[in-house]
Image: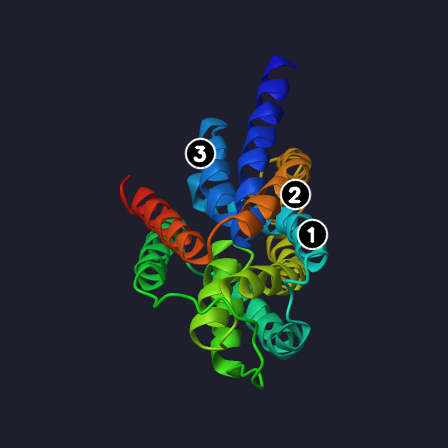
Amino acid sequence: MTHFLLQFVGYLATGLVAGTIAGLFGIGGGIVIVPALLFAFHLDGINPVISMQLAVGTSLSTIIFTNLFAAWNHQRRGAIHWEMVRRYTPWVLLGAWLGTKLATIVDGETLRTLFGLFEISLGIRMLRTPPDNATLLTKEPTANPFVAMGIGTLSTLFGVGGGTMLVPALTLLSGLTIYQAIGSASAIGAMLAMAGTTGMIHAGWGNNALPPGTLGFVVPLAALGVIIGTLTTVPVGVRLAHKTESNLLRRGFGVLLLLVGIKFLWR
């Protein structure tokens, strides 16, 4: 019973941190949730061959709720560009389907390395981005289907809500301000996480290597703890985002990506 409570407290703490970051940066919290769950599953003695897939699937299931709540809070502040959401979503969902297929093929160690390199490259890109003009998008929005599909594939493969790539894409390629990009990424990421979770449950269904109490590649107990934590702190992150100067917010996002990427490679 004590072990069970300690596990749940750990998942709850992960959610509290992830919720703040999700609201602040529009990223779903997966870049915090995946490494934290991977560490927790390691302590529980879960087979390392499947622990990364479990961390990815469980992370995606929590991001559904985190991103929906974050999107609602951003919408109240008028920070979602719904036309861009409409243009990105179908292609992102197609990519999510491809990502679930790849997640069952690529081994855990390769996934860890790819995730780390991916975070570092995006962090450098965000730090080198020119200053935001801090104006609302007035021109016709543009969305490259291949970029959107790639975002869906990689986000599902790495168990993140898409914001780590959507925010850079929406600002660098589509012309949104950092505030609009964060809000829109939350909305797109919620739908991406729904598709990714469904795929990861299906992909792990009937896998004999999975421990008891799992739902495919999702651990319900871990998901519940993280969700409670994230829903508690998402509004805090949203308020911080809209009180922070846009270029400082962008640089903070870049530094966060760099730190997570380095942590994944330095093991």
Which image quadrant: the C terminus?
top left
**Given the current orientation, which residue lies at the most extreme left position?**
266
Residue drawn where x is 52% and y is 59% of the image: 163
Dot 1, how many residues are within 10 Å of its Cα: few (below 14), some (14-19), or many (20+)? many
* Badge 1 vs badge 2, beta-carbon distance below 8 Å: yes
Above or below, 89 against 117 in this view is: below
Looking at the rendered structure, the kind of residue marked 1 is Asn
Looking at the rendered structure, the kind of residue marked 3 is Phe
In the picture of the structure, the residue carrying the numbered disc 2 is: 235
* Badge 2 vs badge 3, beta-carbon distance below 8 Å: no
Q: Which of the two residues, 55 or 68, is positioned nearer the viewer here?
A: 68
Looking at the rendered structure, the kind of residue marked 2 is Pro
Is residue 219 visible from the viewing direction of this image? no
Nearer the observer, disc 1 or disc 3?
1
In the picture of the structure, the residue carrying the numbered disc 3 is: 39
Across and down, in percent, residue 159 comes to: 52, 53
